[in-house]
Image: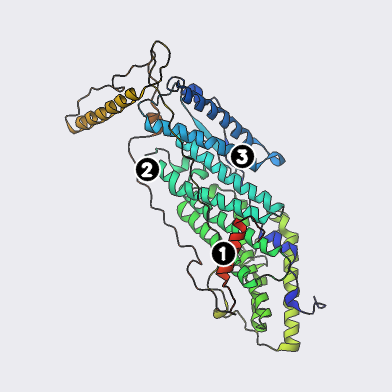
Amino acid sequence: MDDIADPCLAPHPDSAIRLASAMHRFPCPEVVTGELSYERSFKTAGTHPTTKALTSQADEARISLSRALAAKGSKVSHQSIVNAAQSYIPLVHQILLSCKVQPESARLDQRLVFEWSSGMETQSKGKKSFKSEALMYELVMTISCEAMGKAGKACEDSTSGDFAAASRELKQAAGIMAFLAEDQLPQWIARGSNIEEKDLPSEASVGVCDSFKTLFLAVGQQMAVATVLVKSGVPNYTLLAKLSLGIAENIDLFMNTLRSEASLQMPRIDPNFFSLLTFQLNLQRGLSLYFLARNAWAEKDYGIAISMMREATSYLRTRDSPASAKGLPPLDAKSSLKALKDDVNEVRSHMGDLLKAYENDNSRVYFDKVPPSVPDDKRLPCGIMMMKAQEYKLEEVEPAPLQIGSVGGVSKPTTPAEDADRELARQLQEQLDREERGGSGGGGGGGCGGLPSVSTPPAPSYESLSRPPVPVPVPSIGRPPVPGVGRPPVPGVQRDKTDEELARELQDKLNAGLDG
């Protein structure tokens, strides 16, 4: 480093880019195949040609998804998982809607038992599967497959160096998790599901989905930082410092949300994932100070630059104990992070050499006073989170006709007049039920409203299989405010555009598919 004329122009090593973009790749949930068949379950109620086609397509799409999820090792294609999930989701949604709007006709010839295993939970004792007869469970887990598939695709893009594409995939994954946490799962809870979250995969938990929305945005911003670092020339160090601090703050927010909203699921999640989070939390805080030091040196604030670089190196030292608040976890042969050891050593060496160069120049030329710690007025009050989740919506579908019985052994499609009569009969039945509940409570009444039934005893209605009668109120989910929103920029050198404006421009370029 002694031969560098201007230490401010010393380039950051490629290892810093690899570390800044490191992320954990969770396996996707996996469907447990069995004898489940929509076509057989809706054999009686689904005799209408539209419904028969729907159930047949749903069976085929479910098989395709299970095959994509069952791939292992190098054969895993996250794009194939995303494509299969996207094909299956509208079909499950349409079947669910059909049963919802025609509950009196939603009778099954055989039970639908959906069985899944989690991808994010540790599998040290073998895979644990979770069963439910609710179609909403199947829909939720398939949507989760799309989210985790996109996160996996982002990991592949990051490894290949396409950080802009990885950032876009993670914004979409965050939007899907937000949809599950704020829309789909609360709907299921409100309808009175009798299944507790502890009896479901972690991917079907409101708290887990809510926290992973925050995490995916933080990791997406890691990709945005990497996009800037791969470009030639001197980057905007102040902007990078704020983005890195925003990443660390959102990792903190993720952990706090997970502890408060998913305390039951947290112990089940792969512990190697939390080791990487501890690593990234300290790395990002160290990088933020590193970038600030580079900017301070360029602005001729030499003493402050040295103080900042000293603190930056402290975040990259190995912590003394697991309880230490600062430092990286061990990177020894037993660590799940051992593959990062060489890159960490290279970044440590780069920071150390740069610090020595700063100290030498200051002691020989500038003689600027070096404070023992970074003054509060020179620190960033907060970071910037420029990533926003991309809105996710289910495709609009029309309910498929379900039929209660048959005429002459052959199903007969209903006419508009028959549909109107059935609706009037349903309303009359509801009125009678209300009057009966308000009276003496005597028995009586028929379940089909006088409509013809099949010759065999009717199968249980879907309503009785998937929804208990007592509604459960949607829990209030407290979400702490995201750090860095609505805060003023750190005082510093005036620019034509603020760092917040530059962050928005960078986000617009990433959205447009540019490299930043």
Residue linked to disc 1: 504
Residue furthest top in the image: 408
Residue 454 visible in the displayed image: yes
**In this rendering, position of residue 440 left or right of residue 351:** left
Compute the Cα span from label 3 to label 2: 30 Å
Provide the residue designation for mark 2. 190
Q: Which residue reaches farthest right?
A: 3
Q: Nearer the viewer, residue 271 or 383?
A: 383
In the depicted structure, whether residue 452 falls above or below residue 16: above
Indicate whether 143 appears above or below 328: above
Look at the image and tell me in which quarter the N terminus lies.
Answer: bottom right
Task: Name the mark nearer the viewer: 3 or 2.
Answer: 3
Element carrying mark 2:
helix
N-terminal of the pair, mark 3 or mark 2, is 3
Say whether residue 279 is visible: no
The tag on residue 81 is 3
Say if mark 1 contacts mark 3, CB within 8 Å.
Answer: no
Q: Position of residue 135 (x, y in %)?
A: 46, 34
Q: Quadrant of residue 490?
A: bottom right
* Mark closer to the chain start, 2 or 1: 2
Q: Residue at x 67, y 83 (%)?
A: 300
Query: Helix or strand or loop: what does disc 1 sit on?
Result: helix
Q: Amino acid at mark 1?
A: Arg
Q: Amino acid at mark 3?
A: Ile
Q: Position of residue 342 (x, y in %)?
A: 76, 60
